Amino acid sequence: MKEIESTFSAEYRFTQEATLEVLAGKLKRASTKLDALLEKPGAARPTEVKRWKYVRTKTSLDECIDELQAWQTIFEPPWFLAMRIARNSSQIVDDKLKSHTEGAVIKSATNVRNAIRPGQSITKGLLLPADIIDLTQAEKVLHSTAKFLPRPKSTKWIVIDPIPYNDTDRDILTKNVRSLASRLGSVDPSVFNILRCRGFIRMPGDANGLEALNLVFDTPVATSQSPRSLRDHLVKRTPHNLTDRFAFARQVANAIGFVHTLGL
């Protein structure tokens, strides 16, 4: 962030500096607590941990970890938004990202940059063969246009969301869907709380529906529970404690922020 701050407005730079100062304070507190647990190394012995003191300070160390995780949750949305804000100085940002190749967040940021770059190259393999899924097994995701079905030879699920042709020009719609699938293919579900799109399939219409292009999404976690929409949880008033509700709110806000980052 320090290396690309010249690409930001003065207001955004001030916000980022304030956010990073908070991190520095939290890291200093954690470092101080860790240093207090270490026996100073002597000439004949290496550094050791004061085990008796660790037992007494474990709770405060856990609090430090929780604070750092909370800071990261706050920082990630503006960090990825910075990838979009800095698009007018793309070469600087892209060069700096290439010089920092380690870490999942850097990789995700690079994917975001590739997705939002004007005239980005779109993967040709996004149109998937229709026979990769068996639509006879598909079930409707309640209160949603999507359907779900088991992923072959896996305990994960596939979610498909149809985009009907209606009166839209087929070539234009296909181009738009391909672009959308390409952008959503850059998603890291653990960071953005959005399903990753693996491509789309063209399905013929039947007596009950129009011919459509279907976006194909993978669910990130293996589970025996079938996918449900958030609206279904809300309509059925599924009981959730306050912690879960805050977690849902953060995930929805994070997902919306990422949608804006992609310029959708």
Image (cartoon, rainbow, N blue to C red):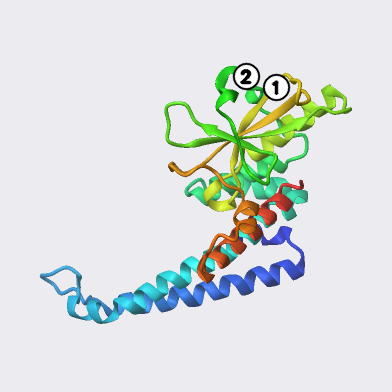
Q: Is residue 17 visible?
A: yes
- Say which mark, if any, is on residue 202: 1
Query: Where residue 201 appears, x then y in whole percent?
Result: 66, 24
Q: In the image, is residue 17 above or below residue 1?
A: below
Residue occupying the point 48% across, 49% down:
103
**Residue at image mark 2:** 130
Query: Where residue 158 appears, x then y in whole percent?
Result: 55, 34
Q: In the image, is residue 168 above or below residue 229?
A: above
Q: Decide if residue 174 is on the left or right side of residue 57.
A: right
Q: Decide if residue 176 is on the left or right side of residue 108.
A: right
Residue occupying the point 50% across, 48% down:
104
Graded by Cα atoms within 10 Å as few (under 14), some (14 to 19) or many (20 or more), the crowding at tag 2 reads some
Name the residue type under label 1: Arg
Name the residue type under label 2: Ala
- Counting residues from the start of the chain, the first of labels 2 and 1 encountered is 2
Q: Residue 245 versus residue 138: which sits nearer the camera?
A: 138
Q: Is residue 99 visible?
A: no
Label 1 near label 2: C-beta < 8 Å? yes
Graded by Cα atoms within 10 Å as few (under 14), some (14 to 19) or many (20 or more), the crowding at tag 1 reads some
Residue reaching furthest to the left: 44
Q: In the image, is residue 160 above or below residue 5?
A: above
Quadrant hosting residue 119: top right
Query: Where residue 254 appears, x then y in whole percent?
Result: 63, 58
Q: In the image, is residue 82 above or below residue 153?
A: below
Q: Residue 228 versus residue 52: which sits nearer the camera?
A: 228
The local secondary structure at tag 1 comes to: strand
- Label 2 to label 1, Cα distance in Å? 7 Å
The local secondary structure at tag 2 comes to: helix
Residue occupying the point 66% across, 38% down:
146
The quarter of the picture where the N terminus appears is bottom right
Query: Where residue 209 appears, x then y in whole percent?
Result: 76, 26
Residue occupying the point 10% across, 70% down:
44
